[in-house]
Image (cartoon, helix red, strand yellow):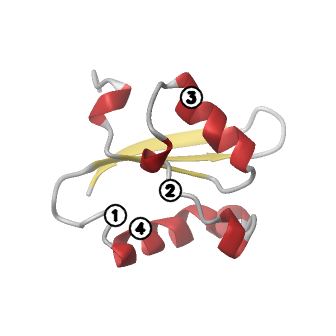
Amino acid sequence: NQLSPEDISHYLLHQANLRIIKSVAKRLSLPEERFPVNLSECGNTSAASIPILLDEAVSSGKITLGKQQKVIFTGYGGGLTWGSILMEL
């Protein structure tokens, strides 16, 4: 996609562990504000964590649909299982 981490508006990551989310932000040298978190409200909701987080981000106005914001969604699980998608919302 030839984008840099700075080109991405928001990173919606699986809400398994706050330490992991903060570590990703640090490794990408990005502000944690680009990584919405709802762990304190919802906990680890497994496969539902990303759709719940997206709904909250849209409802709160952090993400505005139709504004062509680039958003990365990433899910990960036990072992080396993971997947990501880049979407323009």
Question: Is label 3 in a helix, a strand or a loop?
Answer: helix
Q: Can you say whether 76 is above or below 43 in the image?
A: above
Instruction: Indicate which disc residue 26 carries.
Output: 3
Instruction: Name the residue furthest bottom.
Output: 59
CB of mark 1 within 8 Å of CB of mark 4?
yes
Label 4, label 3: how far apart the Cα atoms are:
21 Å
Q: Quadrant of the N terminus?
A: top left
Mark count: 4
**First of labels 1, 3 by sequence position:** 3
Question: Is label 2 in a helix, a strand or a loop?
Answer: loop
Disc 2 marks which amino acid?
A: Pro
User: Which residue bears the numbered disc 1?
Assistant: 62
Question: Is label 1 in a helix, a strand or a loop?
Answer: loop
Left or right, 39 with reference to 63: right
Q: Can you say whether 69 is above or below 48 in the image?
A: above
Give the residue displayed 26% in from the left and 58% down from the top: 89
Disc 4 marks which amino acid?
A: Ala
Label 1, label 2: how far apart the Cα atoms are:
9 Å
CB of mark 2 within 8 Å of CB of mark 4?
yes
Label 3, label 2: how far apart the Cα atoms are:
14 Å
Disc 1 marks which amino acid?
A: Lys
User: Which residue bears the numbered disc 4?
Assistant: 57
Determine which quarter of the picture holds residue 23.
Answer: top right
Instruction: Indicate which disc residue 36 carries.
Output: 2
Left or right, 69 with reference to 44: left
Give the residue displayed 50% in from the left and 56% down from the top: 36
Label 1, label 4: how far apart the Cα atoms are:
5 Å
CB of mark 1 within 8 Å of CB of mark 2?
yes
Left or right, 67 with reference to 83: left
